[in-house]
Image (cartoon, rainbow, N blue to C red):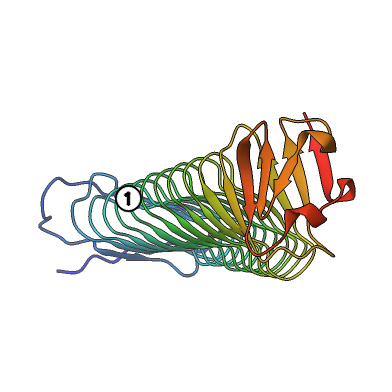
C-alpha cells in the first residue's frame, strides 16, 4: 500500500515525523514534495533506508540508521544523515550538512555550505561556493572545488584537495595528504607525518608537528619551519621565488647550513632536497617568535 502526502498552495511547510523501530506496515521510504515552500522530515528513529527529497525552499531533512539518500535541492537546507552509509546532496543554496556515523558520500552543491562529515570514512565534495568542510573521525577525502574553501581533516589519515581559488587546509591528527591545486593556498599539516603539495599559486606550507614532506609546486611558495616541530623534507625548492618562515629563533646567524640541511643548535629542522643551503641568505628568511 502506498502513502501519498500532499500540501495545498497555502501550506508554507510540510512537516513529517515518522518514526519506527522495525519495518513498518506501511512503508514511507520515499517522501517527495515539489511545490511546497519548505519541508521538515525526520526519520531519526528509522532503521530502514530512506529517500528524502526536499523542495526549492529551506528544508530540514533528517535520515535514520539505514543507508539513506537525501537531496536538499534549492535554498538553504539543513540535512542530517544520522547513522548509516548515506548519500547526501545539498543542491543550490548555503546548506548545513551533517553526515553522522557511517561512510558517507556528500556533495555540498552550489553556495557557501558547511559540512560536518562525522565519524567513519567519508568522501566530501564542496563543489562551487566558499565552503567549510570538516572530515571528523575516520580516513576522509575532502574536495574543495570552486571557491575559497576551508577544509579540515580533523582526526585520522585524511586526503584533502583544495581545487580552484585560495583555500585553507588543515590536516589535523594523523598522516595526512594536502594538495592545494590552483590558487594561493595555505596548507597546515598539524599533527602527524604529513605530505603537503602546494600546486599552482603562491602557497604557504606548514607541516606542523612530525616528520613532514613539503613540495611547493609552481609559484613563489613559503615553507614554515619551527624548532618545536621536528624535521621537514622540502622538495622542489626554487631559490629565486621560494622562501622560509622560521619560529623558535630570532636571527639568521642562529641557523647552520650543511649541504641540504638547515640546523639550529645541532638539530636539523629541514632537509632541502637537491639544494645547497649555503646559497641561502638572510633575505630568504622571515623570523617570528
Quadrant of residue 237 within the rendered picture: bottom right
- At a point 77% along the width and 68% down the height, the residue shown is 219
Closer to us: 46 or 177 = 177
Q: Is residue 114 visible?
A: no
Q: Farthest residue toward the right?
A: 283
Does residue 229 appear anywhere in the picture? Answer: yes
Image quarter of the C terminus: top right
How far across and how far down the image is residue 206, in percent?
A: 64, 47
Residue 274 or 176: which is nearer the viewer?
274
Seen in the picture, residue 262 relative to 54 is either above or below; the reply is: above
- Identify the residue at image location x=36%, y=53%: 81
Give x and y (percent) for residue 260.
66, 55
Examine the rendered structure and indicate whether residue 93 appears above or below residue 151.
below
The picture places residue 85, in percent across and down from the top left corner, at 28, 58
Which residue is depicted at the point 32% across and 53% down?
A: 63
Kind of element beneath mark 1: loop
Spot the residue most to the front. Answer: 258
In the picture, measured across the screen, residue 168 lies left or right of residue 175, that is right
Q: Which residue is mark 1?
A: 120
Q: Is residue 114 above or below residue 275?
A: above
- The reply, left or right, for residue 288 in relation to residue 171 is right
Judge left or right: residue 218 versus residue 123. right
Q: Quadrant of residue 140?
A: bottom left
| Residue 113 on image: x %, y % | 59, 55
Amino acid at each position: 500500500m502506498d502513502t501519498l502526502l500532499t500540501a495545498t498552495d497555502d501550506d508554507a511547510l510540510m512537516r513529517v515525523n515518522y518514526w519506527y523501530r522495525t519495518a513498518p506496515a506501511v512503508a514511507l521510504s520515499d517522501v517527495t514534495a515539489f511545490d511546497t515552500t519548505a519541508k521538515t522530515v525526520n526519520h531519526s528513529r528509522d532503521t530502514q533506508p530512506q529517500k528524502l527529497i526536499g523542495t526549492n525552499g529551506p528544508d530540514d531533512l533528517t535520515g535514520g540508521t539505514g543507508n539513506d539518500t537525501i537531496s536538499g535541492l534549492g535554498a538553504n537546507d539543513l540535512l542530517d544523515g544520522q547513522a548509516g552509509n548515506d548519500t547526501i546532496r545539498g543542491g543550490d543554496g548555503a546548506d548545513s550538512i551533517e553526515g553522522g556515523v557511517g561512510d558517507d558520500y556528500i556533495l555540498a552543491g552550489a553556495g557557501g555550505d558547511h559540512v560536518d562529515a562525522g565519524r567513519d570514512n567519508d568522501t566530501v565534495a564542496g563543489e562551487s561556493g566558499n565552503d567549510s568542510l570538516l572530515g571528523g573521525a575516520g580516513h576522509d577525502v575532502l574536495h574543495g572545488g570552486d571557491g575559497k574553501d576551508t577544509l579540515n581533516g580533523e582526526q585520522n589519515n585524511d586526503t584533502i584537495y583544495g581545487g580552484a581559488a585560495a583555500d585553507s587546509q588543515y590536516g589535523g591528527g594523523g598522516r595526512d595528504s594536502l594538495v592545494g591545486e590552483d590558487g594561493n593556498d595555505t596548507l597546515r599539516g598539524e599533527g602527524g607525518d604529513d605530505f603537503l603539495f602546494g600546486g599552482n599559486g603562491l602557497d604557504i606550507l606548514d607541516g606542523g608537528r612530525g616528520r613532514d614532506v613539503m613540495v611547493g609546486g609552481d609559484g613563489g611558495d613559503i615553507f614554515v619551519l619551527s624548532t618545536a616541530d621536528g624535521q621537514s623534507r622540502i622538495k622542489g625548492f626554487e631559490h629565486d621565488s621560494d622562501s622560509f618562515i622560521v619560529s623558535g629563533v630570532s636571527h639568521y646567524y642562529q641557523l647552520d647550513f650543511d649541504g641540504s640541511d638547515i640546523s639550529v643548535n645541532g638539530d636539523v629542522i629541514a632537509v632541502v632536497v637537491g639544494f645547497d643551503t649555503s646559497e641561502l641568505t638572510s633575505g630568504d628568511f622571515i623570523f617570528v617568535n
